[in-house]
């Protein structure tokens, strides 16, 4: 039977974290189906990333290297991926729900006459027919649905941070070099590089201190900054997050927002200050390793997922916490 195929993404010469997460998920699905796992990488100089992919234990790594595949040229990438699918006919094809996956997924589904499910948060195999069960939030995150579709390949994009990343193994997988048949005449859309000046990489932080409506005013974030500085002396990179209400009130920019329509994170420590724990927020942080909640309301939802909770006005607690951390550091 044909393999589970992962579309890998390469950032600055290395596999990105989402690809490692897909590798972990793909390995499990392949095991359940009794088929192998393959990875496809595309680009103009991807030898290093190809070797790296082998070390995570797939059976095959398809290396689609071509000078025109440098950068992300959607027309050429989709053409190359279609050619590969024509050759190897994967049973399942998974992509990250990144801008690359979101661009390629629908176009490839159309070309291959199959169905795509986007932004999946869980995947499994239906033991009855071997089709992919695709779990994803619907109705603005208020419900979770499981979809099953016919068609080949079984195609899905997968949200980041929902599967643990694969660990390196003693990889012996085969590297299969393929030069796709592409040329510039296939490019219908010109690529534009957008450079963002300041990026808030919440998903890279070890600790996230988040504020919500309970802060009462924008100045509440100054207090969270003090806590963040005190924590950074002992806990690596600490960043400020927030709920959507804090963004809506104009207290902080939207790139700090955690949740369904913000960033999905799983830091070592998540500190939720004055955040009630609406489902759309929880979706973004519930996989944090330790959750600390500070809230005046003992019945708030956030306490249901917290490992430690303080029922108190944050203006009382945060300065005391900062003082204690400074004494200890
Ligand atoms: C389609 C859709 C997408 C959404 N996406 C997101 C998303 O990505 N992220 C997100 O966060 N929300 C999102 N929301 C909004 C979400 O439903 C909630 O409205 C929001 O998360 C609530 O923010 P909050 O907890 O800060 O505010 P509230 O729910 O108002 O909670 C404030 C909390 O602060 C506490 N508090 C008040 N004063 C103090 C004090 N002095 N000290 C300590 N605690 C205090 C209160 O007890 C309360 O629990 C989305 C909603 C929809 C419909």
Image (cartoon, rainbow, N blue to C red):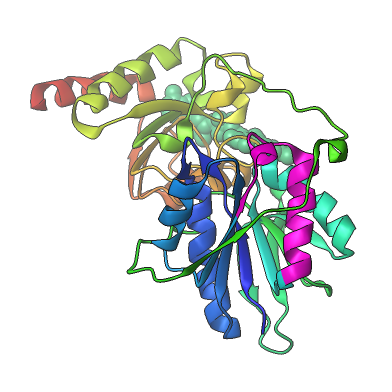
Image spot of residue 161 (x, y percent): 51, 50
Image spot of residue 271 (x, y percent): 38, 35
Which residue is more in the foreground, 112 or 172? 172
Image spot of residue 154 (x, y percent): 75, 69
Name which quarter of the figure residue 108 lies in.
Answer: bottom right
Q: Which residue in the rendered view is the most extreme toward the bottom? A: 128
- Magenta-highlighted residues: 64-87
Name which quarter of the figure residue 312 lies in.
Answer: top left
- Looking at the image, which residue is at 57% across and 25% down? 255
Q: Vertical placement of 102 versus 221: above or below? A: below
Which residue is more in the foreground, 221 or 254? 254
Quarter of the image where ligand 1 sits: top right
Image spot of residue 275 (x, y percent): 50, 34
* Residue 65 forms part of the magenta stretch: yes
Q: Vertical placement of 96 versus 1: above or below? A: above
Q: Quadrant of the N terminus?
A: bottom right
Q: Vertical placement of 12 versus 77: above or below? A: above
160 relative position to 210: left or right: right
280 relative position to 306: left or right: right
Q: Vertical placement of 45 versus 324: above or below? A: below
Number of numbered discs overlaid on the protein picture: 0
Q: Predominant secondary structure in magenta?
A: helix
- Looking at the image, which residue is at 45% across and 29% down? 210
253 relative position to 194: left or right: left
Which residue is more in the foreground, 283 or 73? 73
């Amino acid at each position: 039977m044909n393999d589970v195929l992962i579309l890998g993404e390469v950032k600055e010469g290395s596999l990105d974290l989402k690809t490692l997460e897909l590798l972990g998920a793909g390995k499990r699905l392949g095991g359940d189906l009794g088929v192998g796992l393959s990875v496809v990488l595309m680009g103009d100089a991807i030898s290093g990333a190809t070797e790296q992919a082998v070390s995570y234990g797939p059976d095959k790594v398809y290396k689609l290297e071509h000078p025109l595949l440098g950068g992300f040229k959607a027309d050429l990438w989709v053409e190359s991926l279609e050619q590969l699918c024509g050759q190897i006919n994967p049973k399942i094809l998974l992509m990250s729900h990144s801008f690359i996956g979101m661009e390629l997924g629908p176009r490839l589904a159309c070309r291959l006459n199959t169905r795509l499910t986007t932004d999946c948060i869980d995947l499994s195999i239906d033991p009855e027919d071997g089709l992919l069960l695709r779990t994803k939030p619907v109705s603005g995150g208020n419900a979770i649905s499981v979809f099953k579709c016919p068609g080949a390949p079984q195609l899905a994009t997968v949200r980041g941070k929902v599967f643990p990343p694969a660990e390196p193994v003693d990889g012996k997988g085969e590297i299969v070099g393929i030069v796709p048949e592409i040329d510039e005449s296939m490019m219908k859309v010109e690529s534009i590089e957008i450079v963002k000046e300041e990026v808030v990489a919440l998903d890279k932080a070890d600790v996230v201190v988040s504020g919500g409506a309970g802060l009462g005013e924008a100045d509440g974030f100054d207090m969270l900054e003090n806590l963040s500085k005190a924590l950074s002396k002992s806990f690596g990179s600490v960043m400020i997050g927030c709920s959507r209400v804090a963004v809506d009130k104009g207290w902080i920019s939207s790139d700090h927002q955690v949740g369904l329509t913000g960033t999905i994170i799983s830091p070592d420590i998540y500190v939720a200050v004055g955040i009630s724990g609406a489902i759309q927020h929880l979706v973004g942080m519930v996989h944090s390793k330790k959750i600390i909640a500070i809230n005046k309301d003992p019945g708030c939802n956030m306490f249901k997922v917290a490992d430690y909770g303080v029922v108190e006005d944050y203006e009382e607690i945060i300065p005391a916490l900062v003082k204690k951390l400074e004494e200890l550091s």
